[in-house]
Image: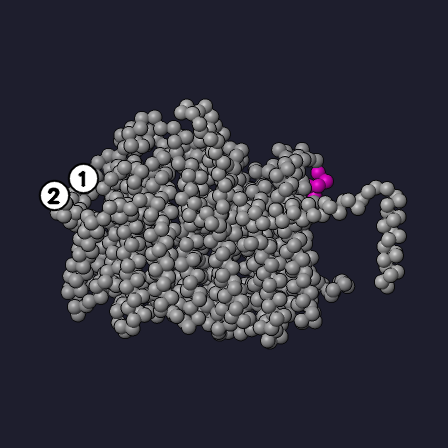
């Protein structure tokens, strides 16, 4: 029963999150902003549209969105939603989780190169470059959780992150991991200050420029996949930030939905408060974040 | 029953070796302008491989080592072949890749197109196959060295197939010097082992030796000797030039199988050490990480498709060595799970790398065959002209990045689980290798998006690339075979797990404590997710991809630019530029550009190049320096008889004074 609820949440909730982020940004900027459900309307509209295709493209152009959504959906099955354990869990699923996201990245970047456009090539290059720097940070965090819990599976690993005693080392390590994963969340989902999802000025951005040429249902898949990825990495981070349990499943799911909403609003606030970083500063910050996450592991094992 | 079984297996092994050795011989006596000799060689090669694979199956069913002893009087004792499951795991790639390469060669290097070197190529190809198999089977160190040297020489002649090209001859020299430097260390290792054990047979060291200074000397000799062959950094210098100079099916067998003889040597040596100290495991982990990260970083800087693949061999050897390091740490600390996962993952990666790297080299070969260039920045858009080649290369690329649902993921996953397991133990150093392995994976992904994108996607960047054509059935058969095996291992890893268990048991003396891989890892879940991924992709493609686009195709939008050209595409160099610049401290990229002085400069040029750090910046300069010093000794050679008489007189007088 719980699993069914989780899968339904997984399928239907993600498109709400970009709406929440955009509404937050609009309110802070003093605008009214699009409806919170805007992405659902967009998806419905795009599904009915025809596609404009470049004569340069091949089947790889479609493989990008298709593989991204399939891989992100499967990866999401490993992530616990709040206090509810993940639908699927087995030893070593953390690696499958990370590599499914990698598969999505491979095909998104390949689809971008398939158009033969300089702009999209530039976006793809940046995407894979920054991912190289974000990946070790994610893994250091996962290792910290494995060390704390003694588990090698994502859901039990995150089941009760703050129950390992309030030893200063563990608490500091968890705080560092949470900070690291928040940065990973922003980078992987192409949010300010690393990327600006609102512009497609090709010189300033990463993700949006990779999908410039997609249209119709393919663009719909991409938008949905992007929201799914935010949901997946957000749920991972929320286990560290909101380790509460209400004692029953309905309460737990409510807490999870509430905290996910709060995370989307927080992201919107960060986007409103900060300017996008200069591109050359992004690698420096990512390296620093990786080192901070490594430091978290050192704190624990020393 | 068991005896008969092993007799049949022994017979099959001997015939496999014999068929491989002789495969190229009849062709030597046939006319160079006829195809018959090549067809004969291919048939013999396939026959030998079938016998070899049947023998491998026999070894796995028997389970016990099969010993074949020849009662020939030889200087260092009679030759002994021992076939145990460890040998069998290494025999699988040679007997798979060798016949596929021969089939590929029918179209890639046909005798009628290469009358001058085709016969030599096939003779040494057969010899290489047999010598590699002999190394895996040798039960005696001298026989091992014998195979080692034949392999080295055969590979030299294969690398220099196109010896009219000075670049190829240079690659051959670098290979020959490196391989013999390595052989020197292996020779020293064998002598030292003889000194310690008193025999050339492959017998265990006594307890306590590994932790002594002798043990340290042994492991260092093994790492230098076998590391030169395997291409562990910094002993990798011969790989990039040799792999890019050899014909593609030779590159495939060299990268897929030949360099694994180094790994085999290491593993076999480890199996003879009853009590390895913990420091060995840590050292191997560090070495593997350096090889892996720097290998893929250098790959990113390459413009030559085959050089790029060669650097990826160094990376994958790094991953294998990480697995070995984990396994050795597990042996030192008595952690059976690490032994099973580390060695199991490393051995599976040996097989997997042979499969997907051969697939990639075959794909690269088909591209070179069709366009005549290895420069990625002159290619592009080949997916439309060679769809099957593109699919094969893409399969290899996804597999080598370790992505599901293909085989590369399974072996990396085993090593990852072992590394994660070490973080929850008191010896946590293995855990620090896990983010390193993740970094290797992410860099490999960047590199293969670059390679696949530059070669197959977008539009053609040169006239050669726009005139490419799909290869014929001889080249496509190996594509299909290797692609299917990659997918099968990726989807059904439980099929290979029992074989790996048997092989890992050969490495650890008290094998009965080792857990089965299937009990440590959830192979059915991997299978489920691999299948689910394929099904979901198919379903989404069916739901969302229109069968027929209803709006006529146009040019790429490109932010509204009306007439994009192929020169506006991102090139492979610009794609990798960010990562190359980030790793500037190790790669030291060189850029040459002409100065632009006027507003409308007629000509401008730009080129970039990533030299090999060890070869171009350390070894070649020091060799040139040594040559310069040696040149001074020429002063003694005056060429006059009187002077030489003077030398003799002076020497005699000096000797008289001192002796």
Q: Quadrant of the N terminus of chain B?
A: bottom right
**In this view, A232 is above or below B634:** below
Q: Residue furthest bottom?
A: B207
Q: Is residue B28 within the magenta segment?
A: yes
The magenta segment is B26-30
Mark 2 sits on what residue? A31
Q: Badge 2 local density, few (<14 within 10 Å), some, or many (20+)?
A: few
Residue occupying the point 51% across, 33% down: B371
Residue A5 coordinates in the image, percent (x, y): 19, 59
Earlier-in-chain disc, 1 versus 2: 2
Q: Is residue A15 left or right of residue B305?
A: left
Residue occupying the point 49% across, 61% down: B286
Chain for numbered disc 2:
A
Residue A58 coordinates in the image, percent (x, y): 36, 36
Look at the magenta stretch and give its main secondary structure: helix
Q: Is residue A124 left or right of residue A5?
A: right
Residue A3 coordinates in the image, percent (x, y): 23, 61
Residue occupying the point 25% across, 63% down: A240
Q: How is the image coloured?
A: one colour
Q: Is residue B143 left or right of residue B106?
A: right
């Amino acid at each position: 029963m719980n699993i069914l609820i989780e899968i339904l949440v997984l399928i239907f909730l993600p498109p709400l999150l970009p709406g929440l982020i955009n509404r937050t940004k609009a309110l802070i900027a003093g605008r009214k902003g699009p409806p919170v459900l805007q992405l659902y309307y967009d998806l419905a509209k795009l599904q009915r549209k025809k596609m404009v295709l470049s004569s340069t493209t091949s089947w790889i152009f479609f493989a990008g969105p298709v593989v991204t959504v399939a891989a992100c959906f499967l990866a999401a099955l490993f992530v616990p939603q709040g206090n509810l354990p993940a639908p699927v869990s087995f030893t070593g699923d953390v690696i499958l989780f990370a590599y499914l996201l990698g598969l999505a990245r491979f095909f998104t970047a390949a689809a971008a190169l398939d158009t033969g456009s300089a702009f999209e090539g530039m976006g793809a290059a940046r995407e894979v470059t920054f991912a190289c720097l974000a990946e070790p940070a994610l893994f250091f965090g996962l290792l910290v959780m494995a060390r704390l819990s003694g588990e090698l599976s994502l859901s039990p690993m995150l089941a009760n992150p703050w129950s390992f005693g309030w030893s200063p080392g563990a608490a500091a390590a968890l705080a560092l991991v949470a900070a690291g994963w928040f940065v990973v969340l922003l980078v992987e989902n192409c949010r300010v200050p690393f990327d600006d999802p609102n512009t497609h000025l090709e010189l300033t951005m990463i993700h949006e420029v990779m999908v410039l040429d997609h249209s119709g249902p393919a663009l719909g898949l991409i938008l949905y996949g992007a929201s799914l990825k935010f949901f997946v990495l957000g749920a991972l981070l929320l286990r560290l930030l909101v380790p509460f349990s209400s004692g029953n499943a309905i309460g737990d799911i409510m807490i999870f939905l509430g905290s996910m909403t709060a995370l989307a609003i927080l992201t919107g606030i960060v986007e409103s408060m900060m300017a996008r970083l200069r591109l050359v500063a992004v690698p420096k910050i990512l390296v620093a974040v990786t080192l901070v996450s490594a430091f978290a592991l050192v704190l624990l094992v020393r | 029953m068991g005896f008969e079984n092993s007799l049949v297996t022994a017979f099959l092994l001997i015939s496999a070796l014999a068929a491989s050795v002789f495969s190229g011989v009849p062709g030597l006596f046939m006319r160079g302008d006829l195809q018959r000799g090549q067809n004969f060689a291919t048939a013999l090669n396939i026959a030998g491989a079938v016998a070899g694979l049947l023998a491998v199956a026999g070894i796995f069913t028997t389970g016990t080592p099969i010993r074949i002893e020849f009662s020939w009087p030889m200087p260092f004792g009679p030759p002994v072949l021992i076939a145990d499951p460890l040998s069998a795991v290494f025999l699988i790639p040679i007997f798979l890749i060798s016949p596929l390469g021969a089939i590929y060669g029918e179209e890639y290097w046909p005798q009628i197109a290469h009358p001058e070197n085709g016969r030599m190529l096939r003779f040494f190809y057969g010899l290489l196959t047999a010598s590699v198999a002999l190394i895996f089977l040798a039960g005696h160190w001298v026989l091992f060295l014998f195979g080692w040297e034949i392999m080295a020489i055969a590979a030299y002649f294969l690398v220099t197939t196109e010896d009219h090209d000075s670049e190829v001859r240079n690659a051959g020299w670098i290979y020959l010097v490196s391989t013999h430097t390595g052989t020197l260390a292996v020779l020293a290792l064998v002598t030292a082992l003889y000194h310690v054990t008193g025999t050339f047979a492959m017998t265990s060291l006594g307890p306590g030796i590994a932790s002594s200074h002798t043990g340290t000397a042994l492991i260092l000799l093994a790492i230098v000797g076998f590391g030169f062959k395997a291409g562990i950094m910094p002993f990798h210098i011969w790989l990039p030039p040799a792999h890019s100079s050899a014909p593609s099916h030779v590159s495939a067998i060299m990268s897929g199988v030949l360099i694994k003889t180094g790994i085999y040597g290491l593993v076999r040596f480890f199996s003879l050490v009853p009590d390895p100290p913990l420091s060995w495991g840590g050292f191997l982990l560090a070495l593997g990480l350096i090889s892996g990260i720097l290998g893929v970083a250098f790959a990113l800087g390459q413009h030559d498709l085959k050089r790029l693949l060669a650097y990826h061999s160094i990376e994958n050897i790094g991953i294998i060595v990480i697995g070995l390091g984990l396994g050795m740490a597990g042996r030192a600390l008595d952690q059976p799970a690490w032994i099973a996962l580390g060695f199991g993952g490393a051995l599976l990666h040996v097989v997997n790398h042979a499969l997907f790297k051969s697939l990639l080299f075959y794909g690269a070969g088909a591209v070179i065959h069709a366009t005549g260039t290895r420069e990625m920045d002159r290619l592009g858009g080949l997916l439309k002209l060679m769809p099957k080649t593109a699919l094969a290369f893409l399969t290899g690329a996804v597999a080598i990045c370790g992505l599901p649902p293909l085989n590369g993921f399974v072996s990396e996953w085993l090593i990852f689980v072992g590394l994660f397991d070490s973080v929850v133990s008191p010896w946590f150093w293995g855990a620090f290798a896990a983010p390193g392995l993740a970094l290797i994976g992410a860099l490999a992904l960047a590199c293969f998006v670059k390679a696949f994108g530059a070669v197959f996607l977008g539009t053609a960047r040169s006239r050669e690339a726009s005139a490419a054509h799909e290869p014929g059935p001889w080249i496509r058969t190996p594509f299909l075979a290797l692609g299917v095996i990659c997918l099968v291992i990726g989807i059904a890893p439980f099929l290979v797990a029992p074989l790996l268990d048997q092989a890992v048991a050969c490495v650890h003396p008290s094998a009965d404590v080792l857990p089965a891989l299937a009990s440590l890892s959830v192979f059915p879940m991997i299978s489920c997710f691999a299948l689910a991924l394929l099904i979901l992709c198919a379903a989404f493609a069916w739901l969302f991809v229109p069968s027929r686009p209803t709006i006529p195709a146009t040019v790429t939008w490109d932010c509204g630019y009306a007439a994009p050209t192929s020169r506006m595409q991102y090139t492979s160099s610009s794609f990798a530029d960010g990562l190359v610049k980030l790793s500037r401290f190790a790669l030291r990229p060189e850029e040459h550009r002409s100065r632009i002085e006027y507003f409308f400069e007629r000509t401008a040029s730009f080129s970039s190049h990533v030299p090999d750090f060890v070869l171009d910046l350390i070894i070649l300069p020091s060799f040139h320096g040594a040559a310069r010093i040696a040149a001074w000794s020429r002063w003694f050679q005056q060429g006059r008889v009187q002077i030489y008489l003077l030398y003799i007189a002076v020497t005699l007088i000096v000797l008289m004074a001192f002796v």
